Amino acid sequence: MHIAVLGINYWPDRTGIAPFTTGRCEYLAARGHRVTVFTGFPYYPGWRVPSAYRGRLLSREVRNGVSIFRSWLYVPHLVTGTRRILHEASFIASASIRTLARVRREKPDLLFVVSPPLGLGLTAFTLSRLWKVPYVFHVADLQPDAALELGMLGRSRTLSALFAIERLAYRSAARVSTLTHAIRRRIVEKGVTPEKVVLFSDWADPALFNIPLDDCGDEFKRSFGLRGRFLVLHAGNVGVKQGLEVMLNAAELSRTRNDIAWLVAGDGAMRETLQERARSRGLGNLWFIPLQPDSIFRELLAAADVCLVTQRKTVGDVVFPSKVLTLLAAGRPVIASLNMSSAVARAIQEAEAGLLAKPEDPDALLTSVLALQSNAEARAAMRSHGRSYARRHWDRERILPLFEAELVRVAEPRRTATAAQYSSPILRPAKSALGLRVARMDYRPGLGPLTLEVRPLPVCRLRILALYRQGSAQKPDYRRPGPARLALSHEARGRQPSLLAKFSVNQRGAPRWRKSMRSVRSKSEDRAHEQKQTMESTARCRSAPGRTLSPPSPNASPLEHRNCRADRPSTRKCRICGSRDR
């Protein structure tokens, strides 16, 4: 199956949506599917394009069996509402053109579109109608709801347009997928059929389960000068939705306590602003470090005594940050300063993996930190409960096979369909020639030959102009004359006879049929069919006037019997019925 994936973030971005889009694509490629990704240049979470990709309009890469086609996008240094709209619009325009230019001759069986950006819903709708293929719209973030709740756009025409695009994308998609039951419930409330909305959950990195549950981060603390301190860690994106001002305020309240250290590890649109505020307040107990490599990041998690998950109080069920999976799989106690009715709060309560604090309240946050600092037994229990919860709900080996199975179900009506359902110009001649003989047709570009399930017929004559197996069989060359062979297969009553077709090409480039396709059946089926043909032919000959009957020849062929005609004078003897003209 050929799957085209559209998403703004992909490897080598290491946080947010990118690791999970990358993991899904590489899993599908490892399972034998052909995966083509159309994405932008890496920039997240620092909003800076790496020097290796800077100054380029297009690029092509292949990684772990996945073809990656990148296109230019505008990346603002200072992120605002207007600049973010321009950022997403630039990618939507460039990715749409790149996708159309690349896939015009190799249409996929399925489109998988990752939102945000929500505007990719327009691209998915257009490509789906143009190529006659279904698409799955994966919603990682309810973008218009988040913009409304955070007051980023207000009730403007832009926000109304986002909601209109959202309705169009949901209505036209074959499936709408999302991360949590809470987000799924909100999508259904928008008028989408419940059976159409499925869960494609993210997963926890298997390496995180190998982090020891006991305190073992002394070496990391020593290297950063934090030995002997109770380390409170925020790891991940530093953006607007995180509301990390509450962490700055809590650090300011505890500035007289030398036994507590606050650490922000990550990057994002708000990092420089927060650093400037921390310097202006003279917070010597708050440190900022960039996003670390995976090995050092796991050491950092092992050294953390408590990890923070913060959100602004207006953010409810519109997002589910992936760092919740990371922290619980690593066995870290969590303090969540966010909306008490959100999906994140419910997950932490169900897992018994941490404490909840009132959002945007530094006093409540500091109180929770002090409570866990003084209770080592509670922290040990939270580590164990969180990891057990992560194993049950976010196991990669369980989630990805379900994801693949759902995509196959969505694409199956197109991959296995009647000939009348195909709109490809290559298959239209086959449709007109096959007629009612074909019960099912299965054509997967790039993965196999044309597969026909036909009714048992003595001769199968197919007038196909040109059809070839991508990448493995010989493609007819229309620039020069000459024969071209094409091996196909069909399936009839559990048997798989082989079909062989010959094509020739004339000087002007139009394919010309040379020889009909012949069917080779098993010996037992051939014997039974010939006996039936012999009995019917003998009965017809006996009813014909002027015939002298004789026993049929054991080597008779049904095709040779067609030379016997009652109305044609001949002295030849019929090899089937043994009759001869008087």
Image (tube, helix red, strand yellow):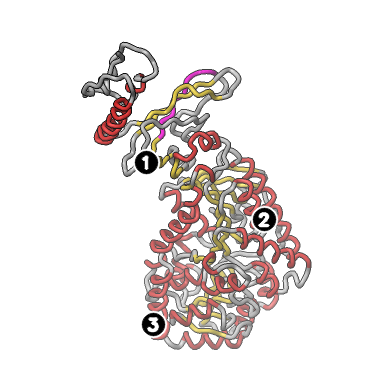
Query: Label 2: which residue?
Result: 122
Of 489 and 146, the residue lying toward us:
489
Q: Secondary structure at mark 1?
A: loop
Residue type highlighted by circle 3: Ala
Q: CA distance from mark 3 to mark 2?
A: 48 Å
Q: Is residue 17 above or below residue 565?
A: below
- Label 3 CA crowd tier, 10 Å (few <14, some 14–19, many 20+): some
Q: Is residue 486 magenta?
A: yes
Dot 1 or dot 3: first in sequence order is 3
- Above or below residue 202? Residue 355 is below
* Residue at image location 47% in from the left, 69% down from the top: 326
User: Marks 1 and 2, how far apart in space?
Assistant: 39 Å
- Asked which secondary structure carries label 3, the reply is helix
The answer to whether 170 is drawn above or below residue 183 in the figure is above
When asked about the image quadrant of residue 337, the answer is: bottom right
Q: Which residue is mark 3?
A: 381
Residue 448 visible to an observer of this rendering: yes
Of residues 546 and 128, the one nearer the viewer is 546
In the rendered image, which residue does mark 1 sit on? Answer: 491
- The quarter of the rendered structure image containing the C terminus is top left
Q: Give, as a three-letter code, the residue at label 1.
A: Glu
Mark 1 or 2: in front is 1
Magenta stretch secondary structure, dominant: strand
| x, y percent for residue 435 | 49, 38
**Residue range of the region highlighted in magenta in the rendering:** 481-488
| Residue 562 location, quadrant | top left
State the residue lying farthest toward the right.
157
- Asked if the stretch drawn in magenta spans residue 415, the answer is no
